[in-house]
Image (spheres, rainbow, N blue to C red):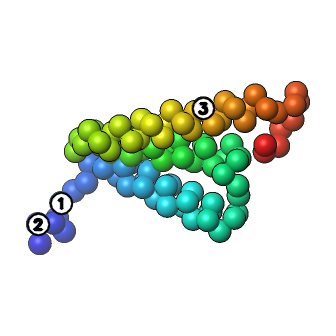
Amino acid sequence: MDALLHSFSLAEIIGVAGFCLYVVNYSLLTLQVFSGRTITYFMINLCAASCVLVGLSSSFNLASALIQCFFILMSLIGILLRLSQRPAGQLGPV
């Protein structure tokens, strides 16, 4: 009964939202709604990792924090690489 009455902190809610973003992103990738080569994929991954990292502030886990930092770094690299490969003036996905 106490578990049902537990009120979640804002950090925990943000962390769960990050989990949801990871699941949606991976599902869309698996179902080929978009490619892992698009900026959209990396942006969603960046948001998910950032949210989960915020969620870890309420219940810290070093291994999880390191994984999220890795995903943030790799997502930023992926975004920058795709932006640098765009021809000047192109607005659509790469």
Q: Which residue is mark 3?
A: 77
* Location of the N terminus (image quadrant): bottom left
Of the pair 64 and 14, the residue shown nearer to us: 64
The mark found on residue 6 in the picture is 1
Using the rendered image of the protein, determine whether residue 50 is visible from the camera's viewpoint. Answer: no
Left or right of residue 24, residue 8 in this image: left
Left or right of residue 60, residue 46 in this image: right
Considering only order in the chain, which callout, 3 or 2, is on the residue closer to the N terminus?
Answer: 2
Query: What distance separates the C-alpha of mark 1 from that of mark 2?
Result: 6 Å
Tag 1–tag 2 contact (CB < 8 Å): yes
Could you say where residue 52 lies in the image, as x and y percent from the top left?
39, 46
Could you say where residue 72 lies in the image, as x and y percent from the top left?
49, 36
Query: What distance separates the C-alpha of mark 2 from that of mark 3?
Result: 44 Å
Q: Which residue is mark 2?
A: 2
Of the pair 75 and 58, the residue shown nearer to us: 75
Indicate whether 84 appears above or below 16: above
